[in-house]
Image: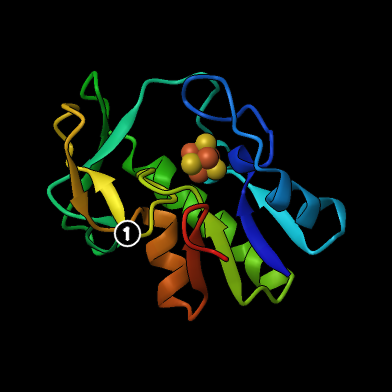
Amino acid sequence: MIIISACLVGEKCRYTGDGFDYTTLRRLVEEGLAVPVCPEVLGGLPVPRDPSEIRGGNGFDVLDGKARVKTNQGVDNTAAFMRGAAEVLAVAQRYSACMAILKERSPSCGSKMIYDGTFTNHRVPGCGCTTALLLREGIRVFSEENYS
Ligand code: SF4
């Protein structure tokens, strides 16, 4: 089974209240080969919501308590992001998933790049919180840009 970011397969769970529709990825779900998850919703955040970015590091740093996740209004969402990551890991373990395809650049789901925490559209190398947790548990993580 493959874990997949729900927003990539049409679920309107992004902070903006919309989603994407990658036909090939949606087919994986329809064929029962992938299960869609949204860590931020699983962590208890609403849709729509203020955008969040990781400040002071990457997803691994958040897991280790060395960085925080904050909204553009300065609200600390670290606990919700950690909860969401743990929920996704639980789903992955329930389905014995060995790989995930997650949305690039998200503070939860990014795998190669994330935003730098300044809300100035500046990207830096690094991964999101859910990606970091899955990687630590031995699950391979790809994005919609490099899974094929
Ligand atoms: Fe949810 Fe991840 Fe998509 Fe953000 S990128 S909406 S956390 S699935």
Q: Is residue 117 above or below residue 25?
A: above
| The C terminus sits in image quarter | bottom right
Read off the residue under disc 1: 112
Report whether the residue tagged 1 is closer than 8 Å to ligand 1. Answer: no
Could you tell whether 97 is left or right of 129 in the image? right
Residue 114 vertical position relative to residue 146 in the rendered view, above or below: above
Q: Position of residue 59 (x, y in %)?
A: 30, 57
Q: Determine the residue positioned at 63% across, 27% down.
A: 12
Give residue 6's quadrant in the image: top right
Quarter-wise, where is residue 91 in the image?
Answer: bottom right
**Applied colour scheme:** rainbow
**Residue at 53% of width from left, 24% of height from top?**
46
* Amino acid type for the residue under numbered disc 1: Lys
Q: Quadrant of the N terminus?
A: bottom right
In the image, residue 133 sits, relative to residue 21, either above or below, namely below
113 and 93: which is toward the camera: 113
Where does the image place residue 28, in percent across and percent down from the top left? 77, 57
Horizontal relation, residue 32 to residue 133: left or right: right
Q: Is residue 43 visible?
A: no
The image shows residue 96 at horizontal and vertical percentages of 70, 77
Comparing 25 with 49, the one in front is 25
Residue plotted at (22% across, 45% down) = 68
Q: Disc 1 on helix, strand or loop?
A: loop
Residue 122 visible in the shown view: yes
Q: Is residue 141 above or below residue 7?
A: below
- Horizontal side of residue 132 vs 60, given as left or right: right
Residue that lies at the very extreme toward the bottom in this rendered image: 138
Residue 142, percent across and down? 49, 64
Q: How many marks?
A: 1
Q: Nearer the viewer, residue 89 or 30?
A: 30
